[in-house]
Image: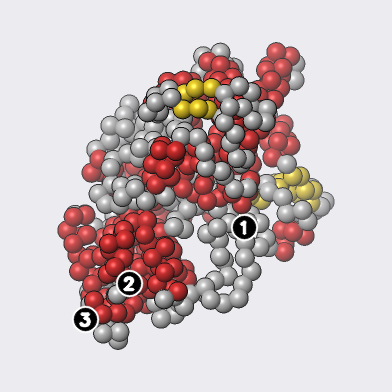
Amino acid sequence: VKFMKAAAAALIATVGTSSFASALTFGTSRGRPTSHLAMSSLPSWNDLQSLASSTPVGSSLDEEVSLRPTGRAAPFVQNKLRLFDSEEFSSDKPPKITLYRDHAGWCPYCMKTMCQIEEKQIPINIELVPMRSYGDKPTEFTKLVPSGLLPALIVETDDGRKQVITESQVIMELLDQWHPPSEGYKPMLPDSNDQAGNARYDKLARLERDLFSWWCNFIFRPERMGGGGSGGLMGMLSGKGGSAEMSGAMKGFLDALDKVEAELKSTTGPWFFDNADHPTMIDFVYVSHVERMLASAAFWKGLDLRSGDEKKRFPCLNAWLEAFEKREYYLAFKSDYFTHVMDIPPQYGPGYDGGFDDMREKFAKSITGRDGKSWNLPLPFDDELQPLYTGPPLPLSVLQAAGIKGDNGKKEDSYQSADPDMMAKACRGMAGWKLASNGEAVARFAARGGPKGGTNPRKTFGAQLADPYAEADKEAQPYADAALRAVCKSLLADDNDAALHAMKSDLQDAVPSDQAGAVAASLAYLRDRVGVPRDLPLASARHLRAHINYAIQSIV
């Protein structure tokens, strides 16, 4: 009974209470015996890997995997060597600097550092380390960095000693100094003799800290209407279905964004400095937290800064975001709102509900897949909160392999006019390739969500969905494995409608009635742990989540 209640809580988001009546009586509602494991019609993981690799999308992704050890692959969140077009270094002669950053793509300070490395194309080694809220840090890292801080830069001297540098701002400044324009690298800071440029940088840096402070006040403290704290006088916001009283914290946050908007408007655009046609360090300092502000404001306050009245209020901010989204490396490190609202609390503390109640409830359901649309088939072409096509929604190699061109014929371009069917097929293909590439391990991971999974005593972590030492439900695992092979088969099919019909039939044959609840809970466990960008970009991740939900609905 305890497990049934837990399963109901896990699945209610997508299958609804009426479907749960069937799920909770799975022992008698269907006649398949417990020993029945009719999986002969399902391809093996090896077969699925071969199928994925035979597609243009899968073949392009296989090639990227083969290039990663050379340091010359496309941007990717888990790359461990970046050489770009350097002739000085190779995989046999790597650079003597190593950046330690977080494994899952959660850390905003790691993100801004990596964006600068990618924009400047700095040759560097990369080591991936869990954040404290996600798992234990390896001993070899804590010996080098006892504080455990990320990011951390390790510089190996000619005599073999290792110097440790922490704090993202210091790391970014040093990397810029060590890779100057005189050696062909893009400048990230104003020249030391540029007094006006340095004064502007300092002004923008102070404004970023002011914006960050207002964001923390707005999200991580209870709102007080009509002022509160240093928020000042209450304001009114129109266009929300009548007048809505604005808290001092919301007003302060929006006023700070107005100042950011004014600074962006003062340039020819889209960046904070006019003297370069690329983002510079101050752009990276802002973007990693602005990305998190967008997600948290929508989820906890019902405030969407990328559409409607707010987009009209902040046109330069939105143009700046869209310019970032056209850069492939930004896609490689950009999270979706769901990942952010899961990873923000363990880093900053819990967010407080407030703002516009109706919109907050609507946005929260969309972000977490409880609206019946955002994580359910058929998926709309775009996401109502998170624009998918203002830049490349998938790696450029995948788009090229799928025959999908940008709106203006460029690679790093918007893709809003792309053929929806071609785009959906490419997104499904990438999700299927990813699932097939490690299917057995993914099934074992998913089975932690079964009634006999995760029962072993183990260390807990701050992140709500992090449980690295949980054990799988061994009874549910083979059936969860079969269900995921059915999902993967569907993702890789050319005709998705026919594939979905086949998946339902496959699942009904492969999952016996007394394992239906355990498998559904295992699939839900996996669905809620699909991370962006760690596992897939959002355009592809949403298809994986939606196909998993279709499987859950077919089982229960």
Q: Which mark is residue 462?
A: 1
Residue 275 quadrant: top right
Q: CA distance from mark 1 to mark 3?
A: 42 Å
- Residue kind at label 3, given as amino acid type: Gly
- Residue kind at label 1, given as amino acid type: Gly
Residue density around tag 1, few if under 14, some if 14–19, many if 20 or more, within 10 Å: some
Q: Position of residue 133 (x, y in %)?
A: 63, 56
Q: Which mark is residue 24?
A: 2
Mark 3, residue position = 31
- Where is the N terminus found, in terms of image quarters? bottom left
Residue located 43% across and 73% down the image: 3
Q: Nearer the viewer, residue 176 or 321?
A: 321
Q: Is residue 189 above or below residue 2?
A: above
Visual colour scheme? secondary structure
**Which sits earlier in the primary sequence, circle 1 or circle 3?**
3
Q: Position of residue 337 (x, y in %)?
A: 47, 44
- Residue kind at label 2, given as amino acid type: Leu
Q: Is residue 15 left or right of residue 101?
A: left
